[in-house]
């Protein structure tokens, strides 16, 4: 085998291994989704995103078939003291060896124009898109009974898989 062939094979092996390596660095803990009322046309998903890697990563997008539109949102107080939800197009930083909590009253994945009613116990499939780790699909249970401050990282584990 020539030096060029060995080099190309090495580069290809590293490129194929990088997504698998990145997957092990990002973990999603305690995901759940909910709607505010039974007939709501919008809903949200919450979770703790952990980064076990040596470099920060950025959650840059979320996608799901459950709604016509899915965005990364946060709550912010406007000049009049009124809280409002805002789209965060740049997403959220997940610090190296740290985490970022998507929670009620804070950052979250917003579902707008739900394609179906979300019932307690349903499961919503969401693809999270990270700048470095790539895409990660998370199965998120709908929990309409959870209290606002319930959770915090260790209650209801969803399942996830690398795309």
Image (cartoon, grey):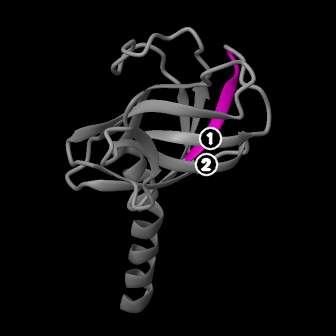
Q: Residue furthest front?
A: 80
Which label's residue is closer to the chain start, 2 or 1?
2
Does residue 40 appear left or right of residue 78 in this picture? right
Please say if 60 is above or below 115.
below
Q: Residues within 10 Å of mark 2 (few under 14, many from 20)?
A: many
User: Residue 59, image x and y in percent?
Assistant: 41, 52
Please say if 93 is above or below 35.
below
Numbered circle sitting on residue 70? 2
Residue range (magenta): 121-127
User: Residue 135, image x and y in percent?
Assistant: 52, 53
Q: Magenta span has 123?
A: yes
Q: Residues within 10 Å of mark 1 (few under 14, many from 20)?
A: many
User: Residue 151, image x and y in percent?
Assistant: 38, 15
The residue under the point 21% across, 48% down is 96
| Element under disc 1 | strand
| Quadrant (top left/top right/bottom left/bottom right) for the N terminus | bottom left
Between 150 and 41, the one nearer to me in the picture: 41
**Magenta stretch: dominant secondary structure:** strand
The residue under the point 58% across, 16% down is 143
Between 159 and 83, the one nearer to me in the picture: 83
Q: How many marks?
A: 2
Q: Is residue 92 visible?
A: yes
Asked if the residue at tag 1 contacts the one at tag 2, i.e. Cβ–Cβ closer than 8 Å, the answer is: yes
User: Residue 68, image x and y in percent?
Assistant: 73, 49
Give the quarter of the image for residue 115: top right
The residue under the point 45% across, 77% down is 9
How far apart are labels 2 and 1 at the CA level? 5 Å
Q: Residue furthest right?
A: 116
Name the residue tied to disc 1.
111
Q: Is residue 134 visible?
A: no
Please say if 89 is above or below 39.
below
Q: Magenta span has 64?
A: no
């Amino acid at each position: 085998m020539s030096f060029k062939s060995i080099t190309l094979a090495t580069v290809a092996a590293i490129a194929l291994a990088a997504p698998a390596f990145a997957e092990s660095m990002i973990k999603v803990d305690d995901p759940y989704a909910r709607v505010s009322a039974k007939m709501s046309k919008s809903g949200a998903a919450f979770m703790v995103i952990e980064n076990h890697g040596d470099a920060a990563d950025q959650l840059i997008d979320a996608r799901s078939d459950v709604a016509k539109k899915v965005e990364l949102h946060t709550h912010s107080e406007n000049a009049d003291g009124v809280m409002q939800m805002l789209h965060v197009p740049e997403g959220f930083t997940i610090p190296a060896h740290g985490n970022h909590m998507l929670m009620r009253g804070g950052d979250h994945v917003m579902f707008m124009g739900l394609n179906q009613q979300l019932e307690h116990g349903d499961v919503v499939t969401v693809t999270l898109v990270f700048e470095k780790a790539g895409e990660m699909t998370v199965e998120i249970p709908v929990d309409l009974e959870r209290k606002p401050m319930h959770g915090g990282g260790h209650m209801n584990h969803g399942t996830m898989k690398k795309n």
